[in-house]
Image (cartoon, rainbow, N blue to C red):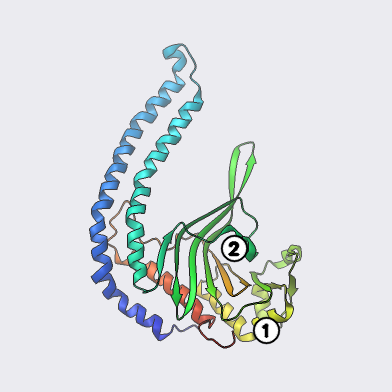
Amino acid sequence: MFQPSNIIEQLRLNFPGYWLQTLRPALEEKEEIRKKYLSRFYLLLAFSLVIIPVLTFVLFFSQDLFGVNIDSGPFFMVIALIVFILQRPYHSYKKTVKNDIMQIFADYFENFKYLSNNGFSIEELEDSLLFKKADIYSSDDSFEGSFENVSLKIAEELLQNVYYTKNGRHKKTIFQGILIRLKMNKNFEGQTLVLKDAGFLNRFKKFSALERVTLEDPKFEKIFEVYSSNQIEARYLLTPLFMERIEKLKNLYQGRSIELSFLNNHVLIAVQTNMDMFEPLSFFKSNINEAKIKRVFEQFLNIFSIIEILNLSEKTGI
């Protein structure tokens, strides 16, 4: 079982004081802003609950009322506009409040920066070979910084494909979760992928420049499958000790899908989850809630644990 270091335990020990002295006062200050935007939302909602039934009545009874049939196209455009306007108070609140609060939260870790909608580039995601090519790439919260001298970037990512049927346009999710890029202590000559085992479907996976790597650990092989452009390097990387660390990493995220791509001098880790990560704020309820902040804090510590589990802070070996 993984035991966190004294550094992580010290961060956990000191966080309640940071909450009381810094985060809570900041949230109390922003509470009036939340209430202002919430009032604006309810005002717009009340207007919508009046105008939409009126427009619907006019559309369906236009022949009886005016002797003409009204085109439904402009009607649906108006509905779409109303929905868009309804979302504005929330997005304005998020922009003016969440960015400030999340940066104050990130300041606890001294050298972290919070960035909204600043995820990984399409080129980096495609080069990782962890995902099928997507039509839509979108990101939400992201952080950049370092822990124990290891540079890292964290981002929530959503990758989707678009397809059409007779019922219209649809989206299919390819990946939803968090991506974690960690700087390694060496530069790789090739690329190595550690993917979740797909059972009999493994035989259908093909990578033009990569070959399947057979390892001597049957337990690891039941959980993951490995592909690499450099067989020797892949075996040097995936020592029994390092494979054990990757298994611990999977346990850390309670069995969720974990996949890794080692390329150049980074490892990109994809954790599939439909949880809304790094979300301590609410629009409809008071945000002076220590439990919600602590949940995001523990999510952060889990990511720091990855560095310790994979032993990336060490400058010798892997």
Quick one: quadrant of the C terminus?
A: bottom right
Res 112 → quadrant = bottom left
Residue linked to disc 2:
124
Which label was assigned to residue 236?
A: 1
Q: Position of residue 220 (x, y in %)?
A: 65, 78
Q: Position of residue 6 (x, y in %)?
A: 40, 86
Q: Nearer the viewer, mark 2 or mark 1?
A: 2
Outermost residue to the top:
67
Q: What residue do we see at 33% from left, 38% from top? A: 45
Q: What residue do we see at 55% from left, 74% from top? A: 250
Q: Position of residue 170 (x, y in %)?
A: 59, 44
| Secondary structure found at label 1 | helix
Instruction: Reply above or below: 81 against 35.
Output: above
Amino acid type of the residue tagged 2 in the rendering: Glu
Q: What residue do we see at 24% from left, 71% from top? A: 21
- Left or right: where 313 falls relative to 54: right
| Secondary structure found at label 2 | helix
Q: Position of residue 141 (x, y in %)?
A: 44, 60
Along the polypeptide, which appears first: circle 2 or circle 1? 2
Res 103 → quadrant = bottom left
